[in-house]
Image: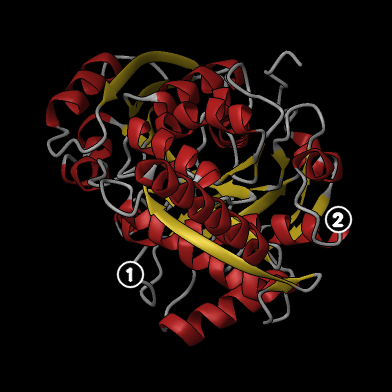
Amino acid sequence: MFDTTRRLAVIALACTATLGFAQANKGEIRIAHIHSKTGPLEAYAKQTQAGLMMGLNYATGGTMMVAGKKIVVIEKDDQGKPDVGKSLLAAAYADDKVDLAIGPTASPVALAMLPVAEEYRKILLVEPAVADSITGDKWNKYIFRTGRNSSQDAAANAVALDAPNNVIGVLANDNAFGRDAVKASKDFTKKAKIVHEEYLPVGTTDFTAGLLRLVDKLKDQPGNKYISVVWSGAPTPFPKIAEMELDKRYGIKLATGGNILPAMVAYKQFPGMEGALYYYFGIPKNPVNDAMVAEHYRQFKQPPDFFTAGGFSAAMAVVTALKKTNGDTNSEKLIQTMEGMSFETPKGTMTFRKEDHQAMQSMYHFKIKADPAFAWGVPELVREIKPEQMAIPIRNRR
C-alpha cells in the first residue's frame, strides 16, 4: 500500500513538473543552437554563435522578444561528431522542448541530424553546413538552410576558373563537405579540365604528400595550371602551398573561395588570385551589414568574419518568420510561412526556395589584393553574382 501510494505521488509530481514546464514555456520561443564549439571547426562555430545572438538582438529591436514571447537560445556542443549531434538534437526537441533548432557547423553532423528533425516534426535551420545532399537527396520538409550549398560555391567559383585551356587539380576535405563540393564543381566545370582529385581528412597537419601528388599530376600539363582548394577546418593547406612556391617552380597557381580572416592571412601571398565568396565584411552594401559591422566592432574591436554573417542571417530568417506567424511556432505553419519567404541579411536579400528550402543568395567574385593595412589578403569585389545568374539545381527530387 505504501509503495503504491509513493508511486502515485511520484507520478503526480512528474506530471505537475511537466505541466509547470509547459506553462512556463508558453511565454517563450525556445531555440537550440547545436554547433562545433570544440574540434577543428571551433572558430567557425564561435563566429556563428556571435552572429546569431547579434542577429536576434538586431531583428527584435533589442528586446529579444517576438509577439510578446521571449526568445531563449540553448547552446549545445556537438564536438564535430555526427553521433553527438544527432543525440543532442533529439534531446533538444524531447527534453528541452525547443520549438526549432539552428546548426550544425559540419556537413557530416548535419546529415546525421536530418532524420531527427523529421522524427520530431520540428524545424532544423541549417547554418553553416554546406553539403549539397543536406537540401538534396537527404532532405526532408523540416529542413531549411540559410548557409550556401556546394552548388552555389561551385557555380560562383566557376566564374573565375572555368575557362578553356585551364587545367585543375582539386584538394578537398575527405568528408561530405569536400566530396559534395567536388561533385558540384564537376557539374559546373564546362570548359576547363579537372585532372586530379586529392582528398585529405579534416585535421590534417602535414599537407606535403597530398600536394606533391597534385603537383605530379599537374606539372607537365599544357595550359594554365591551378590547384583548387575546397577546405574547412584548422589547420589549412594555404601556408604549405605558399611555402612550396608552386607558381614559381611549376607554374601552378592557387584558386580557392572565401574563408575566415585568419585563414586568409596566407592569401596575401597570392595577389591577383580570383575566386568567389558569400561574405567579406567590406563587400555587401546594405543597412543590415552596416549594422552588424558596427556592432561587431563595438563588441569585439574587430570586423565580423565569414561565419558571423551566417549566424546573423539565420537569426534574421527566424525572426522574420516568427513575426509573420505572430509568434506561432507550429512547425506546419512555419513551413508554410518560410517557403518562398524573402528576408534581409548582411549578405543581402535572401529567399528560401520553395522546392528544397535552400536560401538563394548572391555570391561575390573577388580578386585578392595585398594591402599593407590588413594582415590578410583583401578580396576586392570584381562583381556580384546574383542568384538568378547561377542556375542552382534542385537535387531533392521533391
- Image location of residue 69, percent across then percent down: 73, 70
Of labels 2 and 1, earlier in sequence is: 2
For marks 2 and 1, give the one nearer the viewer: 2
Left or right of residue 89: residue 232: left
In front of the other: 222 or 12: 12
Count of number-bearing discs: 2
Report x, y in % for residue 229.
37, 34
Q: Residue at x 61, y 21 (%)?
A: 188
Left or right, 287 with respect to 230, comes to right
Residue found 67% across the figure and 75% down from its top: 58
Instruction: State the residue position of label 2.
Output: 325
Does residue 169 appear in the picture of this structure?
yes
Counting from the top left corner in percent of width and height, residue 301 is at: 42, 84
Between the C-alphas of marks 2 and 1, the distance is 45 Å
- Classify residue 236 by image quadrant: top left
Quadrant for the N terminus in the image: top left
- Three-letter amino acid code of the residue under disc 1: Ala
Residue 279 in view here:
no
- The one nearer the camera, 136 or 326, is 326
Badge 2 element: loop
- The colour scheme of the drawn protein is secondary structure
Q: In the orientation shown, which residue stands out farthest toward the front? A: 1
Helix or strand or loop: what does disc 1 sit on?
loop
Q: Quick check: 285 left or right of 326?
A: left
Other-residue count near label 2 (Cα within 10 Å), few / some / many at <14 / 14–19 / ≥20: some
Which of these two is toward me, 77 or 126?
77
Toward the bottom, the furthest residue is 298
Viewer-nearest residue: 100 or 291: 100
The circle drawn on residue 375 is 1
